[in-house]
Image (cartoon, rainbow, N blue to C red):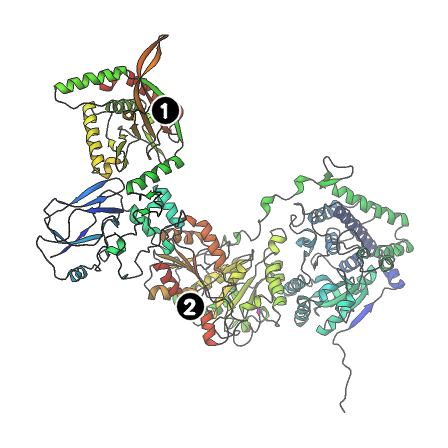
Amino acid sequence: MSTRAALEPASPWVQITATTEDWDAAEADLLISMFSQLSLIRAFEEFVLTLAGEGLVHGPAHSSIGQEGAAVGSVMSLTSDDSVNGSHRGHHQFLAKALGHVAPKGIDPTADVSDEVRTVLLRSLAEICGLSRGYCRGRGGSMHLQWREAGAIGTNAIVGGGVPLAVGQAWAHRYAGSDAVAVTYFGDGATNIGSTLESFNLAAAWKLPVCFFIENNRYAVATTIDEVTAEPRLSARGLGFNIPSWKVDGMDVLAVHLAMTEAVEHMRSGLGPTMIEADTYRYFHQNGPFPGSAFGYRSKDEEKSWRDRDPITQLSSHLIRRDILTSDQADDFTARSKAIMTDVAGEILEPLPGGKPGQRRIKPAEWPDPDFRDVGVRGDLSEFADARVCDTDSFTGALENRKFVETIAAVLYRRMAEDPSVVILGEDIHRLNGGTNGATRGLSDKFPDRVLGTPISENAFTGLAGGIALDGRYKPIVEFMYADFMWVAADQLFNQVAKARHMFGGDNDVPLVLRSKVAMGTGYGSQHSMDPAGVFATSAGWRIVAPSTPFDYVGLMNAALTCKDPVVVLEHVDLYASTGDAPVDDLDYVLPVGKAALRRSGSAVTVITYLAMVNYCLEAVDAGHVDADVIDLRWLDRASLDWDTIGASIKKTNRVLIAEQGARGTSYGGWLADEIQRRYFDWLDHPVERVTGGEASPSISKVLERAAIAKTEEVAAKLTEILEA
Amino acid sequence: MPTLLRMPAIAAGAETAVLSEWQVQEGIPFNKSDAIATVETDKAMVDMEAEEAGVILRFLVGSGEQVEVGAVIALSGTPGEAVDDIEAALRELGVQAASPSSNGSQPSSEKPNSNDAPTTVPTTHGGRVFATPLVRRLARDADLDLGVVSGTGPNGRIVRRDVEMLLTQTLAPSPDATPDELAEVHPPGTDDKGDRAFKDIPHTRIRAVIAARLTGSKRDTPHFYLRGTCRVDKLLKMRAELNAAAENADGTKVSVNDLIIKAAARAHTIVPAMNVVWTQDAVRRFDAVDIAVAVATNRGLLTPVVRDAARRSLSAVSADVSELAERARLGTLAQREIEGGSFCISNLGMYGTEEFSAIINPPQSAILAVGAALSEPVVQDGELAVATVMRVTLSVDHRPIDGSIAAEWMRTFVGIVENPLQILL
């Protein structure tokens, strides 16, 4: 007969309810601050819905009406040094944080509101309407609200997408030695998505000061919470990750505040993450000015039962009961809040010319200039102004033959030693004497707190690095053990890291470096053998470097770490064991941004290639005595491509071969061929030719794998074909 | 010792020529300066003369075949030389043995190397010329008609090397080239249909070039037209006096056309803005007045150029015109004699044509169409009178020349013709 013993979760899970004693004990200033914020946010949200009804909000207007208590109750214990982010339904959290920033001592409801408060309301409204005076210059709109100065680091339209970023922000706060915390707001819908659950784990494992704040409004659009989980008490999820968790009535702003006060104290004490679930309710449908009942997925009775417990009504009754405010004063501020919105909106709205009475439009001058469309996809590279840029022709230091992979470890060591802001993270990078290939050898011994072995959760740790980069105090270097893991982390790589600068208005630097290993040829098969260059090249925002020599690796890694844009540094395992000229002790030079290397000079054909394929192309050209230019691109992204070198070569040879190793579908050269035929149509004497691998990903079988990857023989055959044409 | 006979470069810029006809027979000796073969280029038909006495041992190209300049056309020997094994002799000289078939079709032989063997796929496909973008740009820059270029790239595509060979006028044959590599496919000669309703006369080179150039001119040159009427009684009287004097002095007679050439040349001197041609980057103005004269020949229209017609005397110009016209009819004009000039005169007056308008011959910028001199009623000082009247139509390229300049020229020209002593100045 087996014995059994009950097990307890390692962390507590409690429900906090505010009693009348709590209400009586609450400081009047706190209650007044909460009332003023609630009234202003409610008036703001009602005004947004009015504009949405008039068709003046382009895209969805995700109303937070009904949920304001959770946001206001939770920001009261935060300062401007603390950070918040949120989801698509984030107006109330953003406003609460921003109002707290401009009025840290609270807003007096009996006095005129300050210009700073009015400015917050105006710029928030302008952003939601997509106007240039918005916080993100109209780029972000309702779902991407960011005001970093106030600690509002950006709301997110991908469910769960912002959660790992907040974890990264929390890491930066803790590593900087401050007691600041990060709060990431998300809804019930986000509690079942991988990035959120991965983030719970990562934050708890690393004891990061982040609060996972769940606004459980019971509906993911029209799908009810009971339909999607067997544990609708969502704060129970924290226990699985050893995160202390609170459950609280989100309609009770004081209860929320009490729970948050405990959570913040826990986090500021260095004890790690917390989770708060606030039961709340959105009075309206997912977006727009109609109640959910109008769409048939819930009843009017249910909506009424929640409206009866409205957070503002509850708070007002206590304020009046305690003689802190009179009923008239409360009503007056509610009315004035609405008037303020009408007044503020006069800045951006005007009567519709020729329209009916009351019809409005956006003032034409408020719209962004269409020329602003692509501004800020990337930074302006001004960070390179003081960089020591040199190339093979201008390098004066000593060179010697060294192994490629040792050069990687050497330059990473040098940068970490010189720059205390550099932090490296990835799977197993701190063990195995420098990770699986030795590229991080020696780093964890010397810099143990900046060499972070991660759980196997690429989306979370990539997002964590994204959060660190967006914060800006530290430069994360993320290692992907295999490039194919890019798909696992795709949301963070392509929706978050790549788009953040542009989406938030163009000014938020994203100094993130991704070391992505290309392992084709090692027998790891279909899911470990891709070349990610082609996919990264589709993503505006990323810069891509592909070093084919140890010398280039040093200069390109230094350039990547100098750059304020996300840069993926491609590494090929074929090159790790290769040797080449490497600097002996000068590991500080930066290769020029956007400069390719001409590895061979000829006149009959231009071979454009990168990474490990460079050497195979050179073999083919040398063995066949082919009269070819061989261009090693080094910089692969659209913004950094060396068109001067490519153009000069094409005008000379009139024939182009783009050579790469990987599978055709995700290959890199397609867009380049497209660009070349358009730019150099009149200079081409032959179709732009390409060498790629096969259609399928390489298989594990050695013979099939070789057949799937392009190397010297494929390049040689194609060169012969071109030259005989 | 047998030697190889190659297609000579007849006209500058011509990449190929047609071997119209062999004038000698295999095995029959010929003397130095004998005509061995007649060769036809774009503009000229010339006899290829023997440099030394000799004998043709083997024709390698048949009559009517188009051959690249420099290509081997025959194996020749010294007079009386007999070679037992002609195939061996050819092989020794690096030529794949082959004999032309009597109908002039492509001799068949193994391609020595697929790498440098030109394809025989036609370059045109339903009217579309297959040429690479680079070739199209080069052709545009060089004002080259790709319709007459043979493509050696995939699918018969014209590639850079095809155009560069034309543009750099590479005349030297490649040492290992063989006749079949260099000969081009020739379209079938004549083609009688079963019902005999028509007969196709294959384009001669001259006909094809006339078609291409004038089509191009009508397409690319914005023409405008001015008509003028000249009273030519004085001119005809002067000509009669000049010719009477010449007859006494045993000199040559001048034609009305000679006088018109001189009148036009003088008008060009007075209105130099007419002595121009359009180029891609500039309007090119000439110093000397070179005037082309349209000459009808039995093979098509030719336009030899009279040089410096303004500064040279009437008699010199007249002699020049006679000589050029004669050689045009004989087909012995050199390429340089049909190039240049900004202006052309086409005279159909001798056929009684009253008036007509002509198509500008590029790159020239104008052409004067001259009708017959006819007796007509005219109004003179309010009275009806009879006069000899010649009508002319000036076709002008509007790109380099505006209407006012052409009108000024026409007034000047008519004035000179009507007061013809100026021609003699």
Under circle 2, the secondary element is loop
Q: Is residue B378 visible?
A: yes
- The location of residue B394, given as percent across then percent down, is 35, 26
- The location of residue B15, given as percent across then percent down, is 27, 47
Q: On screen, A221 above or below B147? A: below
**Mark 1 neighbour class, 10 Å CA radius: few under 14, some 14 to 19, many 20 or more:** many
For disc 1, the chain is B
The quadrant in which the N terminus of chain A is found is: bottom right
Residue drawn at (12%, 18%) of the image: B248
In the picture of the structure, the residue carrying the numbered disc 2 is A711
Q: Is residue A416 visible?
A: no
- The location of residue A41, given as percent across then percent down, is 78, 51
For disc 2, the chain is A
Q: Is residue B66 left or right of residue B404?
A: left
Q: Is residue A662 left or right of residue B120?
A: right
Most distant residue in the front direction? B195
In the picture of the structure, the residue carrying the numbered disc 1 is B406
Tag 2: amino acid: Lys
Magenta region includes residue A232? no
Residue drawn at (22%, 16%) of the image: B238
Under circle 1, the secondary element is helix
Give the overall secondary structure of the magenta segment.
Answer: loop
Residue drawn at (87%, 48%) of the image: A331
- The location of residue A187, given as percent across then percent down, is 74, 62
Magenta region includes residue A434? yes
